[in-house]
Image: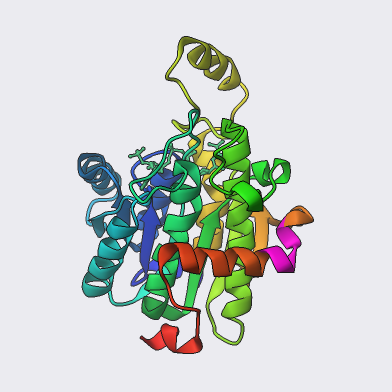
Amino acid sequence: MSAASMAGKTVLITGGNSGIGLVAATALAGMGARVVLACRRSQAAEAAAQQIRAAHPGAGVETVALDLASLESVRRAAREVRERFPVIDVLLNNAGLANVSRETSQDGFELTFATNHLGPFLFTRLLLPAMAPEGRIINVASEAHRMGRMHWDDLQLTDNYWVMRAYAQSKLANILFTRELADQLAGTGIAVSALHPGAVSTSIWPENRWYERAFTRVLKLFLISPEKGARTSIWLASGVEGGKSRGGYFERCKPRQPSARARDKADQTRLWTLSEQLTGLPAFSDKELSA
Ligand SMILES: NC(=O)c1ccc[n+]([C@@H]2O[C@H](COP(=O)([O-])OP(=O)(O)OC[C@H]3O[C@@H](n4cnc5c(N)ncnc54)[C@H](OP(=O)(O)O)[C@@H]3O)[C@@H](O)[C@H]2O)c1
Protein backbone atom coordinates (compact mmCIF):
# COMPACT_ATOMS: atom_id res chain seq x y z
CA MET A 1 0.00 0.00 0.00
CA SER A 2 1.66 3.26 -1.03
CA ALA A 3 0.45 6.74 -0.16
CA ALA A 4 -0.95 7.12 -3.65
CA SER A 5 -2.95 3.90 -3.34
CA MET A 6 -5.05 4.88 -0.30
CA ALA A 7 -7.93 5.41 -2.72
CA GLY A 8 -10.43 2.63 -2.12
CA LYS A 9 -9.06 1.93 1.39
CA THR A 10 -11.14 2.27 4.52
CA VAL A 11 -9.32 3.71 7.52
CA LEU A 12 -11.00 3.57 10.94
CA ILE A 13 -9.55 6.02 13.47
CA THR A 14 -10.56 6.13 17.12
CA GLY A 15 -10.51 9.63 18.59
CA GLY A 16 -10.17 11.11 15.12
CA ASN A 17 -11.90 14.33 16.17
CA SER A 18 -8.89 16.06 17.70
CA GLY A 19 -5.13 16.17 18.13
CA ILE A 20 -2.96 13.80 16.12
CA GLY A 21 -5.97 11.63 15.22
CA LEU A 22 -7.62 14.51 13.37
CA VAL A 23 -4.39 15.37 11.54
CA ALA A 24 -3.91 11.74 10.52
CA ALA A 25 -7.56 11.46 9.41
CA THR A 26 -7.25 14.63 7.33
CA ALA A 27 -4.01 13.50 5.69
CA LEU A 28 -5.30 10.02 4.90
CA ALA A 29 -8.55 11.43 3.50
CA GLY A 30 -6.38 13.68 1.33
CA MET A 31 -4.68 10.54 -0.01
CA GLY A 32 -8.07 9.24 -1.10
CA ALA A 33 -8.93 6.92 1.78
CA ARG A 34 -12.45 6.67 3.12
CA VAL A 35 -12.01 7.73 6.73
CA VAL A 36 -14.25 6.61 9.58
CA LEU A 37 -14.00 8.65 12.77
CA ALA A 38 -14.96 6.61 15.84
CA CYS A 39 -15.54 9.17 18.58
CA ARG A 40 -17.31 9.49 21.90
CA ARG A 41 -18.83 12.94 21.23
CA SER A 42 -20.99 12.93 18.12
CA GLN A 43 -20.95 16.73 17.71
CA ALA A 44 -17.16 16.80 17.83
CA ALA A 45 -17.02 13.91 15.36
CA GLU A 46 -19.33 15.69 12.93
CA ALA A 47 -17.39 18.96 13.28
CA ALA A 48 -14.16 17.08 12.51
CA ALA A 49 -15.79 15.36 9.52
CA GLN A 50 -16.85 18.75 8.18
CA GLN A 51 -13.37 20.13 8.70
CA ILE A 52 -11.89 17.22 6.73
CA ARG A 53 -14.46 17.60 3.94
CA ALA A 54 -13.64 21.32 3.76
CA ALA A 55 -9.93 20.52 3.46
CA HIS A 56 -10.55 17.79 0.88
CA PRO A 57 -13.82 18.34 -0.98
CA GLY A 58 -15.29 15.03 -2.04
CA ALA A 59 -13.47 13.08 0.70
CA GLY A 60 -15.37 10.13 2.11
CA VAL A 61 -15.68 10.81 5.82
CA GLU A 62 -18.05 8.91 8.12
CA THR A 63 -18.57 8.85 11.86
CA VAL A 64 -19.40 6.15 14.38
CA ALA A 65 -20.22 6.66 18.07
CA LEU A 66 -17.68 4.93 20.30
CA ASP A 67 -16.97 5.33 23.99
CA LEU A 68 -13.93 3.20 24.66
CA ALA A 69 -14.55 3.42 28.40
CA SER A 70 -17.75 1.38 28.03
CA LEU A 71 -17.59 -2.26 26.97
CA GLU A 72 -21.22 -2.02 25.89
CA SER A 73 -20.46 0.96 23.65
CA VAL A 74 -17.43 -0.81 22.20
CA ARG A 75 -19.52 -3.87 21.34
CA ARG A 76 -22.26 -1.73 19.80
CA ALA A 77 -19.77 0.33 17.79
CA ALA A 78 -17.99 -2.79 16.52
CA ARG A 79 -21.34 -4.22 15.38
CA GLU A 80 -22.16 -0.98 13.59
CA VAL A 81 -18.74 -0.81 11.94
CA ARG A 82 -19.07 -4.37 10.70
CA GLU A 83 -22.49 -3.65 9.21
CA ARG A 84 -21.53 -0.38 7.57
CA PHE A 85 -17.90 -1.11 6.64
CA PRO A 86 -17.43 -4.82 6.01
CA VAL A 87 -13.74 -4.44 5.13
CA ILE A 88 -11.32 -2.34 7.19
CA ASP A 89 -7.90 -1.71 5.66
CA VAL A 90 -6.44 0.26 8.55
CA LEU A 91 -7.52 0.34 12.18
CA LEU A 92 -5.74 3.20 13.92
CA ASN A 93 -6.27 2.84 17.66
CA ASN A 94 -5.43 6.44 18.43
CA ALA A 95 -7.82 7.59 21.18
CA GLY A 96 -6.42 7.90 24.65
CA LEU A 97 -6.50 9.92 27.82
CA ALA A 98 -4.40 10.79 30.84
CA ASN A 99 -6.61 11.13 33.88
CA VAL A 100 -5.36 13.29 36.71
CA SER A 101 -7.69 11.83 39.36
CA ARG A 102 -8.68 8.22 39.75
CA GLU A 103 -12.10 7.54 38.25
CA THR A 104 -13.81 4.35 37.25
CA SER A 105 -15.58 3.42 34.05
CA GLN A 106 -19.21 2.32 34.04
CA ASP A 107 -17.87 -1.26 34.08
CA GLY A 108 -15.92 -0.51 37.26
CA PHE A 109 -12.42 -0.38 35.75
CA GLU A 110 -9.90 2.40 36.38
CA LEU A 111 -10.70 4.88 33.61
CA THR A 112 -7.23 5.15 32.02
CA PHE A 113 -6.83 1.37 31.84
CA ALA A 114 -10.40 1.02 30.52
CA THR A 115 -10.01 3.72 27.84
CA ASN A 116 -6.42 3.19 26.75
CA HIS A 117 -6.25 -0.60 26.93
CA LEU A 118 -9.43 -2.61 27.59
CA GLY A 119 -11.64 -0.69 25.14
CA PRO A 120 -9.12 -0.84 22.26
CA PHE A 121 -8.40 -4.51 23.06
CA LEU A 122 -12.07 -5.42 22.77
CA PHE A 123 -12.70 -3.16 19.76
CA THR A 124 -9.75 -4.67 17.88
CA ARG A 125 -10.69 -8.24 18.67
CA LEU A 126 -14.30 -7.70 17.56
CA LEU A 127 -13.10 -6.12 14.30
CA LEU A 128 -10.56 -8.80 13.38
CA PRO A 129 -13.01 -10.58 11.06
CA ALA A 130 -13.48 -7.30 9.15
CA MET A 131 -9.76 -6.67 8.66
CA ALA A 132 -8.62 -6.84 5.04
CA PRO A 133 -6.25 -9.77 4.37
CA GLU A 134 -3.36 -7.29 4.15
CA GLY A 135 -4.86 -4.90 6.71
CA ARG A 136 -3.00 -2.90 9.31
CA ILE A 137 -3.64 -2.42 13.00
CA ILE A 138 -1.78 0.53 14.51
CA ASN A 139 -1.76 1.31 18.21
CA VAL A 140 -0.74 4.75 19.40
CA ALA A 141 1.37 4.04 22.48
CA SER A 142 3.96 6.34 24.06
CA GLU A 143 7.52 6.57 25.28
CA ALA A 144 5.83 6.96 28.68
CA HIS A 145 5.62 3.15 28.63
CA ARG A 146 9.28 3.13 29.76
CA MET A 147 8.23 4.62 33.10
CA GLY A 148 5.51 2.06 33.51
CA ARG A 149 5.06 -1.42 34.84
CA MET A 150 2.09 -3.71 35.00
CA HIS A 151 0.78 -3.55 38.56
CA TRP A 152 -0.51 -7.10 38.46
CA ASP A 153 -1.54 -7.05 42.14
CA ASP A 154 -3.53 -3.85 41.64
CA LEU A 155 -4.05 -3.23 37.91
CA GLN A 156 -6.93 -0.89 38.70
CA LEU A 157 -4.58 1.21 40.86
CA THR A 158 -6.87 1.41 43.85
CA ASP A 159 -3.77 2.33 45.91
CA ASN A 160 -1.33 5.14 45.11
CA TYR A 161 -3.07 6.44 42.03
CA TRP A 162 -1.36 9.19 40.15
CA VAL A 163 -1.68 10.19 36.56
CA MET A 164 1.68 9.00 35.23
CA ARG A 165 1.44 5.69 37.06
CA ALA A 166 -1.87 4.99 35.34
CA TYR A 167 -0.91 6.44 31.96
CA ALA A 168 2.48 4.68 31.78
CA GLN A 169 0.90 1.35 32.72
CA SER A 170 -1.75 1.79 30.02
CA LYS A 171 0.85 2.69 27.36
CA LEU A 172 2.98 -0.30 28.37
CA ALA A 173 -0.19 -2.37 27.95
CA ASN A 174 -0.54 -0.94 24.40
CA ILE A 175 2.84 -2.35 23.41
CA LEU A 176 2.35 -5.69 25.18
CA PHE A 177 -0.99 -5.97 23.35
CA THR A 178 0.59 -5.01 20.00
CA ARG A 179 3.25 -7.68 20.31
CA GLU A 180 0.89 -10.40 21.48
CA LEU A 181 -1.62 -9.55 18.76
CA ALA A 182 1.15 -9.84 16.17
CA ASP A 183 2.09 -13.25 17.59
CA GLN A 184 -1.54 -14.39 17.52
CA LEU A 185 -1.90 -13.16 13.91
CA ALA A 186 1.34 -14.79 12.73
CA GLY A 187 0.71 -16.50 9.41
CA THR A 188 -1.90 -13.93 8.36
CA GLY A 189 -1.18 -10.88 6.20
CA ILE A 190 -2.33 -8.44 8.85
CA ALA A 191 0.38 -6.00 9.97
CA VAL A 192 0.47 -4.81 13.58
CA SER A 193 2.46 -1.92 14.98
CA ALA A 194 2.71 0.51 17.87
CA LEU A 195 4.17 3.99 17.88
CA HIS A 196 5.23 6.97 19.90
CA PRO A 197 4.06 10.22 18.28
CA GLY A 198 6.47 12.48 20.15
CA ALA A 199 5.55 14.95 22.89
CA VAL A 200 2.75 16.74 21.08
CA SER A 201 0.80 19.89 21.83
CA THR A 202 -2.76 18.52 22.08
CA SER A 203 -5.63 18.56 24.53
CA ILE A 204 -4.37 15.39 26.25
CA TRP A 205 -2.32 17.52 28.63
CA PRO A 206 -4.39 18.35 31.73
CA GLU A 207 -5.67 21.90 32.12
CA ASN A 208 -8.43 21.61 34.71
CA ARG A 209 -6.71 23.24 37.69
CA TRP A 210 -4.78 26.51 37.71
CA TYR A 211 -1.42 24.81 38.33
CA GLU A 212 -2.09 22.31 35.52
CA ARG A 213 -2.88 25.19 33.17
CA ALA A 214 0.33 26.97 34.23
CA PHE A 215 2.42 23.80 33.83
CA THR A 216 0.83 22.94 30.46
CA ARG A 217 1.28 26.48 29.15
CA VAL A 218 5.03 26.29 29.81
CA LEU A 219 5.26 22.70 28.58
CA LYS A 220 3.54 23.54 25.31
CA LEU A 221 6.46 25.80 24.41
CA PHE A 222 8.52 22.63 24.03
CA LEU A 223 5.97 20.34 22.41
CA ILE A 224 5.80 19.52 18.72
CA SER A 225 2.76 20.34 16.59
CA PRO A 226 -0.01 17.75 16.00
CA GLU A 227 1.04 17.83 12.32
CA LYS A 228 4.49 16.55 13.24
CA GLY A 229 3.07 14.23 15.90
CA ALA A 230 0.80 12.51 13.36
CA ARG A 231 3.59 11.69 10.91
CA THR A 232 4.40 8.20 12.18
CA SER A 233 0.70 7.24 12.29
CA ILE A 234 0.25 8.41 8.70
CA TRP A 235 3.44 6.68 7.58
CA LEU A 236 2.45 3.37 9.19
CA ALA A 237 -1.06 3.62 7.73
CA SER A 238 -0.02 4.46 4.20
CA GLY A 239 3.65 3.62 3.63
CA VAL A 240 5.13 0.33 2.50
CA GLU A 241 6.99 -0.32 5.78
CA GLY A 242 3.80 -0.18 7.83
CA GLY A 243 2.50 -3.19 5.94
CA LYS A 244 5.49 -5.27 6.98
CA SER A 245 5.43 -4.67 10.72
CA ARG A 246 4.73 -7.70 12.88
CA GLY A 247 4.54 -6.12 16.31
CA GLY A 248 7.12 -3.38 15.78
CA TYR A 249 7.35 -0.16 17.77
CA PHE A 250 8.11 3.06 15.87
CA GLU A 251 9.03 6.67 16.50
CA ARG A 252 9.76 9.35 13.87
CA CYS A 253 9.00 6.81 11.15
CA LYS A 254 11.75 4.49 12.35
CA PRO A 255 11.74 1.26 14.37
CA ARG A 256 12.69 1.53 18.03
CA GLN A 257 13.30 -1.06 20.67
CA PRO A 258 10.63 -0.75 23.37
CA SER A 259 11.50 -1.31 27.03
CA ALA A 260 12.46 -4.74 28.38
CA ARG A 261 9.12 -4.85 30.23
CA ALA A 262 7.29 -4.30 26.95
CA ARG A 263 9.18 -7.23 25.42
CA ASP A 264 8.33 -9.66 28.23
CA LYS A 265 6.51 -12.52 26.51
CA ALA A 266 5.06 -13.85 29.78
CA ASP A 267 3.53 -10.43 30.48
CA GLN A 268 2.20 -10.19 26.91
CA THR A 269 0.37 -13.47 27.32
CA ARG A 270 -0.77 -12.68 30.85
CA LEU A 271 -2.26 -9.34 29.79
CA TRP A 272 -3.91 -10.92 26.74
CA THR A 273 -5.61 -13.66 28.78
CA LEU A 274 -6.61 -11.29 31.56
CA SER A 275 -8.03 -8.81 29.05
CA GLU A 276 -10.12 -11.58 27.49
CA GLN A 277 -11.51 -12.37 30.93
CA LEU A 278 -12.18 -8.73 31.85
CA THR A 279 -13.94 -7.98 28.55
CA GLY A 280 -15.84 -11.27 28.46
CA LEU A 281 -14.21 -12.60 25.28
CA PRO A 282 -13.56 -16.28 24.69
CA ALA A 283 -9.95 -17.40 24.28
CA PHE A 284 -8.66 -16.41 20.86
CA SER A 285 -8.78 -18.91 18.04
CA ASP A 286 -8.03 -18.62 14.32
CA LYS A 287 -11.74 -19.06 13.64
CA GLU A 288 -12.29 -15.57 15.09
CA LEU A 289 -10.74 -14.14 11.92
CA SER A 290 -13.58 -15.41 9.77
CA ALA A 291 -16.42 -15.17 12.33
N1 LIG B 1 0.14 14.38 22.99
C1 LIG B 1 1.22 13.70 23.32
O1 LIG B 1 2.25 14.27 23.70
C2 LIG B 1 1.22 12.21 23.24
C3 LIG B 1 2.42 11.53 23.53
C4 LIG B 1 2.44 10.15 23.44
C5 LIG B 1 1.30 9.47 23.09
N2 LIG B 1 0.14 10.15 22.84
C6 LIG B 1 -1.05 9.39 22.48
O2 LIG B 1 -1.61 9.91 21.30
C7 LIG B 1 -2.99 9.56 21.23
C8 LIG B 1 -3.81 10.74 20.75
O3 LIG B 1 -3.76 11.74 21.74
P1 LIG B 1 -3.62 13.30 21.41
O4 LIG B 1 -2.33 13.72 21.97
O5 LIG B 1 -3.95 13.56 20.00
O6 LIG B 1 -4.72 13.90 22.41
P2 LIG B 1 -6.20 14.46 22.19
O7 LIG B 1 -6.21 15.59 21.23
O8 LIG B 1 -6.73 14.69 23.57
O9 LIG B 1 -6.95 13.25 21.51
C9 LIG B 1 -7.39 12.14 22.25
C10 LIG B 1 -8.60 11.59 21.56
O10 LIG B 1 -9.03 10.43 22.31
C11 LIG B 1 -10.43 10.56 22.50
N3 LIG B 1 -10.92 9.82 23.65
C12 LIG B 1 -10.63 10.01 24.95
N4 LIG B 1 -11.37 9.18 25.70
C13 LIG B 1 -12.16 8.46 24.85
C14 LIG B 1 -13.15 7.47 25.03
N5 LIG B 1 -13.53 7.04 26.23
N6 LIG B 1 -13.74 6.96 23.92
C15 LIG B 1 -13.41 7.38 22.69
N7 LIG B 1 -12.49 8.35 22.46
C16 LIG B 1 -11.88 8.87 23.54
C17 LIG B 1 -10.64 12.05 22.66
O11 LIG B 1 -12.01 12.36 22.50
P3 LIG B 1 -12.62 13.74 23.10
O12 LIG B 1 -12.26 14.81 22.10
O13 LIG B 1 -14.08 13.45 23.17
O14 LIG B 1 -11.98 13.96 24.43
C18 LIG B 1 -9.77 12.57 21.54
O15 LIG B 1 -10.42 12.46 20.31
C19 LIG B 1 -3.35 9.04 22.61
O16 LIG B 1 -3.42 7.62 22.58
C20 LIG B 1 -2.18 9.47 23.47
O17 LIG B 1 -1.98 8.62 24.58
C21 LIG B 1 0.09 11.51 22.89
Q: Residue at x 46, y 39 (%)?
A: 97
Q: Quadrant of residue 175?
A: bottom right
The answer to whether one can see residue 253 in this image is: no
Which residue range is magenta in the image?
A: 262-267
Q: Position of residue 6 (x, y in %)?
A: 41, 67
Left or right of 259, for residue 15: left
Q: Residue at x 22, y 56 (%)?
A: 58
Q: Position of residue 254 (x, y in %)?
A: 70, 56
Is 32 part of what is drawn in magenta? no
Is 265 part of what is drawn in magenta? yes
Q: Nearer the viewer, residue 183 or 94?
A: 183
- Image quadrant of ligand 1? top left
Quadrant position of the C terminus in the picture: bottom left
Left or right of 180, for residue 133: left
Q: Nearer the viewer, residue 238 or 197?
A: 197
**Dominant secondary-structure state across the stretch colored magenta:** helix
Q: How is the image coloured?
A: rainbow
Q: Residue at x 42, y 47 (%)?
A: 21
Q: Quadrant of residue 129?
A: bottom left
Vertical relation: 77 (above or below) 115: below
